[in-house]
Amino acid sequence: MSGQTDCGCDNCHNKMCVSRVPIFNGLETDELRKVAALIMKRKYAKGEFMSLEGDPTDHLVIIETGRVKVFRYTPEGKEQILYIFSKGDFFGEKNLLSDRKSTYDVEALEDTDVCMIGRNEFQMLLREYPVIGIKVIQELSGRLENVENAVQSMGTKDVESRISGILLDFAGKYGKQHPRGILVDLPLSREGIANFIGTTRETVSRKLGLLQDEGVIEMIGNKKILVLKKDSLKI
Amino acid sequence: MSGQTDCGCDNCHNKMCVSRVPIFNGLETDELRKVAALIMKRKYAKGEFMSLEGDPTDHLVIIETGRVKVFRYTPEGKEQILYIFSKGDFFGEKNLLSDRKSTYDVEALEDTDVCMIGRNEFQMLLREYPVIGIKVIQELSGRLENVENAVQSMGTKDVESRISGILLDFAGKYGKQHPRGILVDLPLSREGIANFIGTTRETVSRKLGLLQDEGVIEMIGNKKILVLKKDSLKI
DNA sequence: CGCGCAGTTGATTAGGTTCAAGGGATGTGG
DNA sequence: CCACATCCCTTGAACCTAATCAACTGCGCG
């Protein structure tokens, strides 16, 4: 068994999972094995809530497959989506290092598999392998940059630019090559897109319609968009 | 000299500076001494640029006194302010752990003193004292939460609410008790506030005028605001 | 195949931007 | 310490983008 990359047992399988996660990239094979031993797995069905605002979450949750949306409600009931997370992304770190409660809801947009590490185990890992801390800092820096981009976009661009921006973003993350362009599997409904970029579902609908009229995109049902002229989406 | 908190020498002075910085809070006295030895000091005059977008900054910069604005320009020349940093805040960490360049400009809003740590020294510290990494993660988490709040605010609130929000924020950070309320020393001009919350200077002017008419605030010149009814600013 | 939810489209309104001009604060030099 | 020049702020009016309200359509799922 040892020496092989995957013998099929849980531990080997976890090791595979762990090795695909950015924050454990700097570790050696035997270190990965140790980390893998601490991992718990779990599945969530589409529509299931994985975490609620105010929860004293006590696990770091790493997405293995699937997509989730991370969002908050205002007191008036408006939803603001902050992130769409997929493979390799994690959440729950805030609660593990201080005693803060979750500041957002997390909902599975599709059936989703995750790896989880308990609070104590993660703290132990951080102390034993400082490189993990550095990786986490890098990941958080990247996430920070994303949110900073969102602030800039909302602060300085009109709705049309923001829609273009998010389409480009989705194309990069979820797009597949297609004879006529890039086929994007949308993670969100029109309303979801609206709640991501700070507008209304009607406006998203209208602006997508315009982009289609201009021949920039082609809507395929409500869940896919074919990006025909990626360059015309330039922000 | 040893045993005293401050003998006046550079090293002791640096130690003082270092001990006031959140990310070094978890360290013992003799560890602080080691950190202090790595510190370089520098002053910036009001209006001076401390970092430019695209710079391959190679120092972690920690504010000791003063206030700075962190911002970006869109290709069209619109300024978006991302943070106002003051005592204890730091920037430049992104570049120290990967090879990424700075993604924003930093300008001193007043005369500012900083402590700086070089790239290699900081990496060494992180490896030697994992607790520093944890503190950095906590700081970044806090910053992330701030920006997430900004996104939510811009995505779901009208300008009046955003102005109220930023006034509350400023009151908490820069406000002093005053017989009739909280006296806030504004770090930004009207245009600066506008570029922070994603609106125009005219609109900021109008909305502040309204708040003054309602007796919620009182403008004292252009650089101070007296918050009379803090509760009426509730978002 | 039909029901229900999501998306589209239209008409109206409102909040905020833009353009334009006038007023006041800040700080510098005499 | 006052006068002046500059920059910033304020105020007004017209315009425009996007929100809202409302009705209709059609996709997608059972």
Image: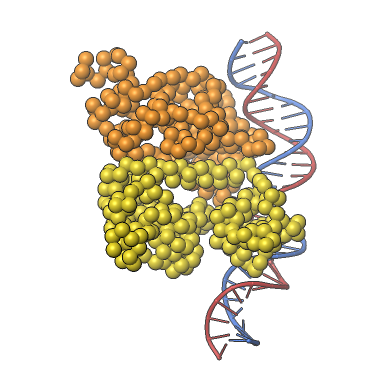
Chain colours: A orange, B yellow, C red, D blue
Q: Which residue ends up furthest to the left in the rendered image?
A: A3
The answer to whether one can see residue B215 in this image is: yes
In the figure, is residue B75 to the left or right of C20?
Answer: left
Residue sitting at x 60%, y 55% = B171
**Residue A68: x %, y % from top left:** 50, 28
Q: Which residue ends up furthest to the front in the rendered image?
A: B3
**Residue A33: x %, y % from top left:** 27, 24
Q: Count how many numbered circles sit on residues in the image.
A: 0
Residue sitting at x 69%, y 61% = B180
Q: Quadrant of the N terminus of chain A?
A: top left
* Along the line of sight, the residue nearer the viewer: B46 or A121: A121
In the figure, is residue A199 to the left or right of B106?
Answer: right
Q: Is residue A146 above or below residue B43?
A: above
* Along the line of sight, the residue nearer the viewer: B197 or B177: B177
* Quarter location, residue A75: top right
The answer to whether one can see residue B61 in this image is: no
**Residue A122: x %, y % from top left:** 37, 31
Residue sitting at x 47%, y 35% = A95
Residue sitting at x 71%, y 56% = B216
Q: Is residue B12 above or below residue B96?
A: below
